[in-house]
Amino acid sequence: MIIASSTLEVVYDYSRCESLLIFCKLSSLKVEFYGYRWEMLPVFLESCPNLKSLVVGSATHREKEGINILSEPRSFLTSLEYVKIERPLKGEAKEMKLVAYLLENSTVLKKLTVRLDDSRKNEESFVLKELFTIPKLSSSCQVVVL
């Protein structure tokens, strides 16, 4: 399944009024984001109890800013095994919070793949240091930096 951030925003708004449907058969998800609107993702992930693979993509169009929803999870991500974040990481707070959320709440995560932003080469060691100090719930998780 491929879902856009605008759809996630509607899902999030709905979740504040009603319980979300559970997507039991969803095992692979690609989420396309405009800008850094990743904050709504955890609410949707909690409705995907059998999700094994997640790709977080991005597009070049910028959306409006201002939504800050990334909060403590209501439940752990018990089936997520593989995550790939396609947008190059710059070390910004929102993106590192998403990475931390995935590492700290995925019980069986095997591999998290990220890329670093080429324009931040002088800050690369800072981003790497922060990335590798995030605690991982899954002891077998491998963090791959491209």
Image (cartoon, helix red, strand yellow):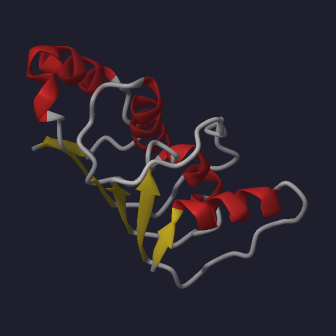
Q: Residue at left 60%, top 80%?
A: 24
Tell me which residue sits at (38%, 25%) in the image: 92
Asked if residue 60 lies left or right of residue 6, the reply is: left
Image height of 105 relative to 108, above or below: above
Horizontal and vertical percent position of residue 18: 88, 65
Residue at x 35% of width, y 57% of height: 59
Answer with the quarter of the image where residue 81 lies: bottom left
State which quarter of the image contains the N terminus. Answer: bottom left
115 up-or-down from 85: above or below:
above
**Quadrant that contains the C terminus:** top left
Question: Which of the 4 image quarters holds residue 110?
Answer: bottom left
Whole-percent x, y for residue 48 in the image: 58, 69
Q: Quadrant of residue 95?
A: top left
In this image, 27 relative to 66: left or right? Answer: left
Point out residue 126 in the picture as x, y percentages from the top left corner.
21, 14
Q: Nearer the viewer, residue 133 or 58?
A: 58
Compared with 130, 46 (above or below) is below
